[in-house]
Amino acid sequence: MANITLYTKNGCPQCRMTKHFLETHNVPFVEHNINDEPQYIDYLKEQGFQAVPVLEADGLESFSGFRLAELQKLAI
């Protein structure tokens, strides 16, 4: 099982959709909400991301947004 980290923020529909997908498919993940943990904002910018959600997983290229095809790779 891949180590999965999901970066989210409050009031973000794509964040909610991504989180809901992972939860309903019983995919374990660690969530960091940038509203509660602003120290991750600079990290995400350094990685080239401008928006959340951002998902990092072992064996997958990190991506932002709600990407169903990528998420389905984790739900195997």
Image (cartoon, rainbow, N blue to C red):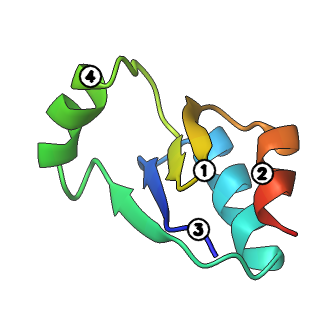
- Indicate the amino acid at tag 2: Leu
Q: What residue type is labelled 1?
A: Gly
Q: Which of marks 1 and 4 is nearer the N terminus?
A: 4
16 horizontally vs 3: left or right? right
Query: 63 or 52, which is in the foreground?
Result: 63
Tag 3 secondary structure: loop
Q: Residue at label 1?
A: 59
Q: Horizontally, is 31 left or right of 45 in the view?
A: right
Task: Indicate whether 54 appears above or below 35.
Answer: above
Identify the residue position indicated by label 2 in the image.
71
Residue 46: which numbered mark, if any?
Answer: none
* Disc 4, SS: helix
**Mark 3 or 4, which is nearer the eye?**
3
To which quarter of the image does residue 20 belong? bottom right
Q: Residues within 10 Å of mark 4 (few under 14, many from 20)?
A: few
How far apart, in angstroms, are the residues tagged by discs 3 and 4?
23 Å
Give the vertical position of 17 relative to 74 (above or below). above
Q: Residue at x 53, y 72 (%)?
A: 29
- For disc 4, the marked residue is 45
Between the residue at mark 1 and the residue at mark 2, the CA separation in whole angstroms equals: 12 Å
Cα–Cα gap, marks 1 and 3: 7 Å
Labels 1 and 3: the sequence-earlier one? 3
Q: Earlier in the sequence, mark 2 or mark 4?
A: 4
Marks 1 and 3: CB-CB under 8 Å?
yes
Quadrant in which residue 70 is drawn: top right
Residue bearing mark 3: 2
